[in-house]
Amino acid sequence: MSLLEKTKKRTIKWLVSSCVVIVLIVDSSLIVVVDAAQAEAAQEGRLDGFRMVMGALAGLVLFLYGVIRMSEGLKAIAGERMKELLGKFTTNRFAGVATGTVVTAVLDSSSITIILVVGLVNAGLLTFVQSLGVIMGANIGTTVGSQLIALEINEYAPLLLVVGAALHFLAKSEALQHAGLSVLGLGLIFFGLDEIGNAAEPLRNYQPFIDTMKRMEHPLMGALAGAGATLLIQSSSATVGIVITLASQGLITLPAGMAMMLGAEIGTCSDTLLATIGRSREAVRAGVFHLVFNIISVALGLIFIAQLARLATWLAFGGGVPRQIANGHVLFNGLSVLLFIWFTPQIAHALKWLIPDKAQPGEQTDSAAEPSHA
């Protein structure tokens, strides 16, 4: 790359970063004014719906953009190593679960992990049976994000943004640039969640919203809402993060939060199924297993949601609803894997029967090959 091209690239980076910083500063200064006006309006039973929706959407955009940037940085740092890890350390179902957990925790996305698995199965680098443990482990790995969000460290978002931007735009080492991109993405995630929380805060005193959230306490209603939200924004991490953020504002109760978290596990299967289109039968089976595993797990979770909530509360050691929801997320996925891991051979056999291999060209069935005696 010539000196002119390097200078041009660095100038563009500076312009982009400057625009982001200006937007964030202006947005932050407006939040205080808008929130005060909205809080006063909520007390009077009226809300500025447009400002609230725009604030929430802006926060969601920042959150999703942060997830993308963080994932890009982590993939650039460890993506190839994660592929090697998936190929080597999946000799049995237990190793597969551990590998799926680690890879997803590093990549910060169960969808990315499972789509990688589908690709490896399609390429013949991983068998369908080997993929089952990894897929289950991916569900556990995604809970790391919810635990991080439940720490409520949003006040450190500006520091993460500054440090991440400095590393990404100023560092000469590519490894440091990628690390900076990951930190910048993490800062955007927390900043976006904080924006969503600020936009939703006036709803605390808005009776129609309170009534709606009450209805979400019904397990089936909450699960449907969580699944719908995840289908819409294509990210279970975003759904769970928003639920935890709203819980920190006192807008969502534990029963509603747990139900919506369970629903998010169903919605996240959509992108995995899309990734199987046009792939081999083995790859399709892997994607369908993810759906079947999540549906059965969520069904059991909804049946035992009260017990799950009590256990999550006990493990929070006095922590608030956000911590309890995050604990419920870990418990649900951990217990689901603990239950299913013993039956993976039977599940694999059933899926091979339901989704048989395609007949090879020229291959005939026994009945078709027999001569006619009529």
Image (cartoon, rainbow, N blue to C red):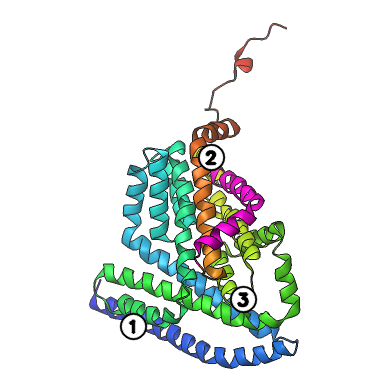
State the separation of the CA atoms marked 2 and 3: 41 Å
Of the residues tagged 1 and 3, which is closer to the observer?
A: 3
Q: Nearer the viewer, residue 212 or 290?
A: 212
Magenta segment range?
289-317
> Does the stretch in magenta take in 315?
yes
The spot of residue 97 in percent (x, y) is 42, 46
- Residue 11 tag number: 1
Which residue is rendered at x = 49% and y = 53% of the image?
Answer: 139
Mark 2 or 3, nearer chain start: 3
Which residue is rendered at x = 36% and y = 50% of the image?
Answer: 83
- Residue 72 tag number: none
State the separation of the CA atoms marked 1 and 3: 44 Å
Mark 2 or 1, nearer chain start: 1
Q: Are marks 1 and 3 in contact (CB under 8 Å)?
A: no
Residue type marked 2: Arg
Q: Are marks 2 and 3 in contact (CB under 8 Å)?
A: no
Residue pointed to by mark 2: 285
Looking at the rendered image, the quarter that the C terminus falls into is top right
Residue pointed to by mark 3: 250
Residue type marked 1: Thr
The spot of residue 330 in percent (x, y) is 50, 57
The spot of residue 355 in percent (x, y) is 58, 34
> Does the stretch in magenta take in 31?
no
Which residue is rendered at x = 61% and y = 92% of the image?
Answer: 36
Asked whether residue 236 appears in the rendered view, the answer is no
Mark 1 or 3, nearer chain start: 1
Asked whether residue 166 appears in the rendered view, the answer is yes
